């Protein structure tokens, strides 16, 4: 990844001038795929955030559209259910003037035995540019990069990563707190099965935050300590000096055996309630990637309270996904 000063990366940038202000270092983006945050540098993360800031302004216009990806085709290739990620990618692509194709595994020829490789190659033959893939198998997006010349974006692969959700969460923290370095971020819940936890962890560590992973012993792998995280099984202790808490969904669909005694026990030990917030910093930022289980990970009072950024995360998702689509297509010479 190269860094230059005052070098425009596009012939006619649809970005507001602020993005290329004189004096600001600017990264020349070269990645064609976004597969995870583990491999991104701090410089690349910051470049995505600055690009997303520029795109935020577009959503405030009466005509919320720029021609950056006009004539390009983006394919939503979802093998798992989604509300936020799928709709947000669709809207982001539309705001960049791209055409969007929607694929749903259950209504496709996958049900007749077509392989992932054949599905991708057949769609590519229609003349598309970007695949956005969600799949239950970790590594599926990496595999697709070997089957196609298109850009590939990981929209969640098994328990591996969900990079755009990680970007959204870190961008929202950066927006609310003005920085990432030095912040104490607590991630709570089903860490073992969470691709969101992994993407958050890699990005936050890269930018200098202190990350503590909290949950039942069965759901917080100690292996994370070797990667630089703290682990804890005591939420109240971890929250005492926390700046941010990110509550993860209990993933019933990925938990194969009984890993905590009962829902009531989980809520008592790890649920975020108004009572539990006493004794925490008054400006503690409360996050959840969604979808939330109300009354489990957090109470409705907390989810809808003044410290919650849950809906702001969703709003920021649009700008982040516009930035990712824009940058990856730019690296392919497609905008
Ligand atoms: N946060 C998230 O990935 O939500 P969806 O499953 O609704 O896309």
Image (tube, rainbow, N blue to C red):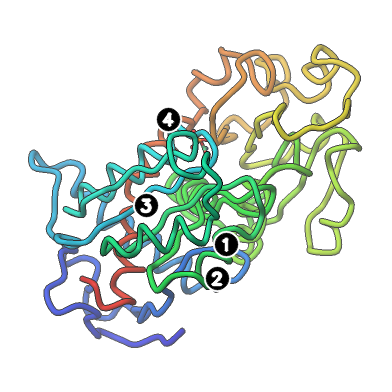
Question: What's the mark number on residue 311?
Answer: 4
Indicate the position of residue 8 as horizontal and vertical percent values: 21, 81
- Residue at point 42%, 30% (across, down): 311
Q: CA distance from mark 1 to mark 4?
A: 23 Å
Q: Secondary structure at mark 3?
A: helix
- Residue at point 86%, 42% (across, down): 232
Q: CA distance from mark 3 to mark 2?
A: 16 Å
Depth check: 243 or 2 in front?
2
Indicate which disc, 2 or 4, sits on the residue closer to the N terminus.
Answer: 2
Q: Secondary structure at mark 1?
A: loop
Please give the residue where the numbered disc 3 appears in the rendered image: 321
Please give the residue where the numbered disc 2 appears in the rendered image: 40
Please give the residue where the numbered disc 1 appears in the rendered image: 36
Q: Residues within 10 Å of mark 4 (few under 14, many from 20)?
A: some
Whether the residues at callouts 2 and 4 have beta carbons within 8 Å, the answer is: no
| Image quadrant in which you'd find residue 199 | bottom right
Give the foreground label among 1 and 4. Answer: 1
Indicate the position of residue 71 as horizontal and vertical percent values: 15, 61
Q: Is residue 93 visible?
A: yes
Indicate which disc, 3 or 1, sits on the residue closer to the N terminus.
Answer: 1
Q: Is mark 2 within 8 Å of ligand 1?
A: no
Q: Residues within 10 Å of mark 1 (few under 14, many from 20)?
A: many
Indicate which disc, 3 or 2, sits on the residue closer to the N terminus.
Answer: 2
Q: Is residue 173 visible?
A: no
Whether the residues at callouts 3 and 2 have beta carbons within 8 Å, the answer is: no
Q: Residues within 10 Å of mark 3 (few under 14, many from 20)?
A: many
Q: Is residue 141 left or right of residue 198?
A: left
Whether the residues at callouts 2 and 1 have beta carbons within 8 Å, the answer is: yes
| Image quadrant in which you'd find residue 124 | bottom left
Give the foreground label among 2 and 4. Answer: 2
């Amino acid at each position: 990844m190269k860094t230059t000063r005052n070098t425009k990366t596009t012939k006619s940038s649809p970005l507001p001038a602020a993005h290329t202000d004189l004096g600001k270092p600017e990264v020349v983006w070269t990645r064609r795929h976004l597969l995870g945050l583990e491999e991104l540098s701090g410089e690349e993360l910051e470049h995505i955030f600055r690009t997303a800031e520029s795109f935020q302004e577009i959503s405030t216009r009466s005509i919320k559209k720029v021609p950056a990806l006009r004539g390009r085709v983006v394919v939503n290739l979802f093998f798992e259910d989604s509300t936020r990620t799928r709709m947000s990618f669709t809207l982001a692509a539309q705001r960049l003037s791209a055409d969007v194709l929607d694929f749903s595994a259950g209504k496709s020829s996958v049900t007749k035995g077509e392989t992932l490789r054949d599905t991708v190659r057949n769609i590519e033959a229609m003349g598309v540019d970007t695949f956005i893939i969600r799949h239950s198998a970790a590594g599926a997006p990496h595999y697709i990069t070997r089957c196609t010349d298109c850009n590939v974006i990981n929209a969640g692969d098994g328990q591996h990563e969900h990079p755009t959700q990680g970007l959204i969460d870190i961008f929202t923290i950066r927006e609310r707190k003005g920085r990432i370095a030095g912040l104490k971020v607590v991630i709570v819940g089903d860490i073992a099965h969470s691709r969101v936890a992994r993407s958050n962890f890699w990005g936050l560590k890269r930018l200098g935050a202190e990350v503590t992973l909290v949950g039942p012993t069965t759901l917080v792998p100690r292996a994370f300590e070797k990667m630089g995280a703290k682990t804890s099984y005591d939420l109240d202790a971890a929250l005492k000096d926390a700046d941010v808490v990110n509550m993860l969904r209990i993933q019933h669909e990925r938990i194969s055996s009984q890993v905590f005694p009962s829902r009531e026990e989980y809520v008592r030990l790890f649920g975020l309630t108004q009572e539990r917030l006493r004794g925490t910093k008054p400006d503690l930022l409360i996050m959840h990637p969604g979808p939330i289980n109300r009354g489990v990970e957090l109470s409705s009072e907390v989810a809808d309270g003044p410290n919650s950024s849950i809906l702001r995360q969703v709003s920021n998702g649009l700008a982040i996904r516009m930035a990712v689509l824009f940058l990856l297509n730019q690296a392919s010479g497609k905008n």
